[in-house]
Amino acid sequence: MANHEKRPMGDKVHLLLAFRRHKNNLGLSNECIRVVINDYDLDLALLEEKCKRLGGIWRIHHTANTRDTKKAKIWLLHKLIESNQFDGCIDSIWKTALLQKECKAENYFMFDVDTPEEPHLSDIITCIQNNNGTIEKIIQTPSRGIHIITRPFDSRYVLMRPYVTLIRDGYYFIKEIK
């Protein structure tokens, strides 16, 4: 990108992450591609094309919490001062900075529910609602489970259910690319 081109970057951003895991791609190595979202539809389309070009089975995820660019800039500056191991890869370390837990700008919970069985899914959703949890999104996963994005609440009773894991700063599934 040339210096005169606009680089829109807000105080808060989301990222797309594409993962190619060895266990799903025999003969291909693990790989991760990270993209800061400026224009969701365009960035997703470009990421999909890149995944197709690289080959294999990819899973694209979206950050559950926005990232604070001011906190990430401070993290990045400290890393650059502390070490010279990052010479020549500022773009990569910038994305690493954005993904640090101390750089999250929101505090959504993501419940990873690993069962396709409807009675369990309904019970977990009801439990969240009965404990004053506000569900923001429910996303189907490739393993026929779900990701549930909520505002923070007392989640102890939900976590007593089988198949449920709480991820405080995770990525939810968007799509699979083959």
Image (cartoon, helix red, strand yellow):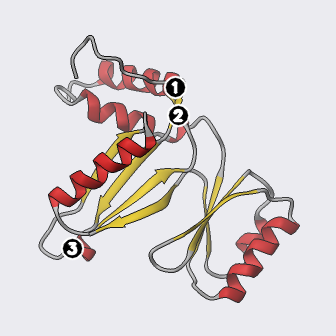
> If you read the primary sequence from the N terminus, does the residue marked by circle 2 or circle 1 appear first?
1
Label 1 is placed on what type of residue?
A: Lys
Q: CA distance from mark 2 to mark 1?
A: 5 Å
Category of crowding for the residue at label 2, using alpha-carbon neighbours closer than 10 angstroms: few (below 14), some (14–19), many (at least 20): many
Q: Residue furthest top?
A: 4
Which mark sits nearer the N-terminus, 2 or 3? 3
Q: Contact (CB < 8 A) between labels 2 and 1?
A: yes
Disc 2 target residue: 103
Which one is earlier in the sequence, the residue at label 1 or at label 3? 3
Q: Residue at x 38, y 58 (%)?
A: 60
The residue at which mark 1 appears reads as 71
Across and down, in percent, residue 72 comes to 46, 28
Question: Quick one: 138 or 40, which is closer to the camera?
Answer: 40
Q: Is residue 79 above or below residue 110?
A: above
Circle nearer the viewer, 1 or 3: 3
Q: Position of residue 176 (x, y in %)?
A: 36, 67
Q: In which image quadrant can residue 30 be found?
A: bottom left
State the residue at coordinates (33%, 55%). Answer: 18
Q: Amino acid at mark 2?
A: Cys
In which quarter of the view is residue 163 placed?
bottom right
Q: Which residue is mark 3?
A: 25
Q: Which mark is residue 13?
A: none
Left/right of residue 119 with respect to residue 96 in the rendered view: right
- Residue 78, given in percent of the width and then of the height, sits at 39, 22
At 28% across and 53% down in the image, what residue appears?
A: 32
| Amino acid type assigned to the residue bearing label 3 in the image | Asn
Q: Is residue 58 above or below residue 102?
A: below
Q: Nearer the viewer, residue 2 or 81?
A: 2
**Separation of residues labelled 2 and 3 (CA atoms):** 32 Å
Q: Secondary structure at mark 1?
A: helix
The x and y percentages for residue 88 are 16, 26
